[in-house]
Amino acid sequence: MKKATYFSLAMAVLIVTVKAISWWQTNSVVVLASLVDSGLDVLSATINMLAIRYALQPPDHEHRFGHGKAEDIASIGQASFIFASGLFVITEAIDRFIHPHIVDNEFVGIAVMLFCSFITVFLIIFQRRVVKKTGSNLVDADAYHYFTDIIINLVVAGSLLITKFLHTQLADSIFGIGAALYIMSGAVRIAAKPFSHLMDEEMSDAERAKIRDMVLAHSGVAGMHDLRTRISGVNSFIQFHLELDGDMRLEEAHHISDDLEKKIETAFPRSEVLIHQDPVRGENRKSEVA
């Protein structure tokens, strides 16, 4: 996860540099839209790097559940920056629509956009591997952000082609507004998942069903109820009441709980499982059915 943030920051700095040169050469608002978005990439990549370093710290006396929510907070912060950049570009595009500017050196801008798209593909491939291995929401949000960058780069290249061959400056403003709206819609999607984590939303129905099936499949278990789950960064927390025979010896009950904890933690890496044991006899069984 740390390597992913370092790579992201280095790539963002490189992309901003070449796009700044492209904007200086072309004077295009749609290139400016892409430059602003990439400029915020540098800021968000820096925040991501600091957030992940903090989130990966082990639990301490003041944060017994760890620091994982720092990831979710940073993801929402990243989405806010992206949304704000979209608003800025729309404002600039409207101004250019009212007061048209001449776009120059279109082929320079096209070449830069294609180059940035090419190198961004390698960053996304690396980030997806990190997400698959760690489940990091922050790296996932960053990867999605860079994917939208590729789309925007291609839109920018298309706008410059139209401007060059149709000799119209309106395409620059229209495509700039389109790119900005796409940026803003992406920001909303990026914020949705970490927001649900900050609100301690339950794990998915499929994951909860998997937990119930694992518990009820154990030969010594009479039932279960009050399954509660939540996610914090790359960590998940699972707790439930385990129904056991009231005449069972404490040592045996403890062994069953330990066995279930290990199985669940294996099935859900980076999870913490808390089990409360309830003694039951026949008619008192309260197993979950949903």
Image (cartoon, grey):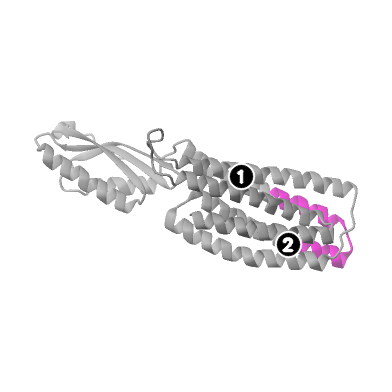
In this rendering, position of residue 99 left or right of residue 162: right
Q: Does 166 appear in magenta?
A: yes
Q: Please rate how many residues cluster around mark 1, counting C-alpha atoms within 10 Å: few if below 14, some from 14 to 19, many from 20.
A: many
Chief secondary structure of the magenta portion: helix
Instruction: Identify the residue at image location x=18%, y=31%.
Output: 284
Circle 1: residue type: Ala
Instruction: Identify the residue at image location x=63%, y=66%.
Output: 119
The numbered disc on residue 79 is 1
Residue situated in front as seen by the camera: 117 or 59: 59
In this rendering, position of residue 62 left or right of residue 75: left
Q: CA distance from mark 1 to mark 2?
A: 24 Å
The image quarter containing residue 224 is: top left
The region drawn magenta spans 157-181
In this rendering, position of residue 266 left or right of residue 258: right
Q: Does 190 appear in magenta?
A: no
Q: Horizontal and vertical percent for residue 107?
A: 81, 68
The image quarter containing residue 7 is: bottom right
Residue at label 2?
18
SS category of the residue bearing label 2:
helix
> As drawn, which residue projects farthest toward the top?
284
Instruction: Identify the residue at image location x=62%, y=49%.
Output: 186
Instruction: Identify the residue at image location x=78%, y=64%.
Output: 109
Is residue 9 placed above or below 251 in the rendered structure? below
Picture mark count: 2
